[in-house]
């Protein structure tokens, strides 16, 4: 056997060793930052899950004022935007109509000059009473329950709906006799 001398591996100099440690520490820092970001994102999602989005809708039962506040033969549009209700008073009493078109759910407009509700989406027309007479709407507007509170104010309850085609407009709660 021959004695071959194997050269010793070159020893890293101090500057090369520091560079490798700096690179390792840099990657280690990036790794920890990525881990912290992922963990923070996870906990943010978990905390957000505990506080879900809540839609604040107007109350379904509300007071609209006294019977004398409504003129005979007029449609009151004050409650259209906030509560989606028209209040109509005729010689016999007061009723509350839904502002949702029975065709596709758009919101019709009250046209005082023409004395009708006209839906801007597809042209459905409704008389002051809520009966449909033109356009694609398949049925009249719905009425809501209406009653007098103990203090004399009118209460509209939108949880109760009355449909003309089912004969529900004859129900005592769908019309307030004055």
Image: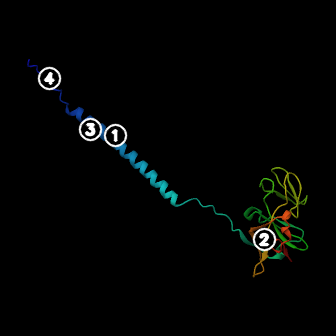
Q: Say few, some or many: other residues with alpha carbon within 10 Å of mark 4 (under 14 / 14 to 19 / 20 or more).
A: few
Q: Which residue has dot 2 on it?
A: 145
Q: Which residue has dot 3 on it?
A: 21
Query: What secondary structure is marked by label 3?
Result: helix
Sequence order check: which comes first, mark 3 or mark 4?
4
- C-alpha gap between disc 2 and disc 4: 101 Å
Badge number at residue 27 = 1
- The residue furthest bottom is 150
Give the mark count. Answer: 4
In this view, the residue in front, 137 or 39, is 137
Sequence order check: which comes first, mark 3 or mark 2?
3
Eyeballing the image, is 158 above or below 7? below
In front: label 1 or label 2:
2
> What residue is drawn where x is 79% and y is 75%?
147
Residue 160, by quadrant, is: bottom right
Query: What secondary structure is marked by label 2?
Result: strand
| Image coords of residue 20 (percent x, y) | 27, 35
> What residue is drawn where x is 83% and y is 61%?
141
Q: Quadrant of the N terminus?
A: top left
Badge number at residue 7 = 4
Query: What secondary structure is marked by label 4?
Result: loop
Question: Could you tell me if the residues under marks 2 and 4 are in contact, i.e. CB atoms within 8 Å?
Answer: no
- C-alpha gap between disc 1 and disc 2: 69 Å
- C-alpha gap between disc 3 and disc 2: 78 Å
- C-alpha gap between disc 3 and disc 4: 26 Å
Q: In which quarter of the image is the C terminus?
A: bottom right
Q: Say few, some or many: other residues with alpha carbon within 10 Å of mark 3 (under 14 / 14 to 19 / 20 or more).
A: few
Badge number at residue 18 = none
């Amino acid at each position: 056997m021959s004695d071959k001398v194997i050269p010793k591996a070159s020893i890293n100099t101090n500057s090369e060793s520091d560079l490798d440690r700096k690179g390792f520490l840099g990657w280690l820092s990036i790794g920890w930052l990525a881990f912290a970001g992922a963990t923070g994102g996870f906990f943010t999602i978990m905390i957000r899950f505990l506080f879900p989005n809540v839609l604040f809708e107007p109350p379904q039962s509300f007071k609209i004022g006294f019977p004398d506040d409504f003129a005979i033969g007029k449609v009151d549009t004050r409650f259209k935007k906030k509560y989606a209700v028209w209040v109509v008073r005729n010689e016999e009493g007061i009723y509350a109509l839904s502002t949702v078109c029975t065709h596709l759910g758009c919101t019709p407009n009250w046209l005082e000059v023409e004395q009708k509700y006209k839906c801007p989406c597809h042209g459905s027309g409704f008389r002051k009473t809520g009966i449909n007479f033109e356009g694609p709407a398949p049925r009249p507007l719905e009425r809501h329950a209406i009653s007098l509170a103990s203090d004399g104010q009118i209460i509209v309850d939108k949880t109760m709906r009355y449909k003309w085609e089912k004969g529900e407009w004859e129900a005592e709660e769908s019309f307030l006799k004055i």
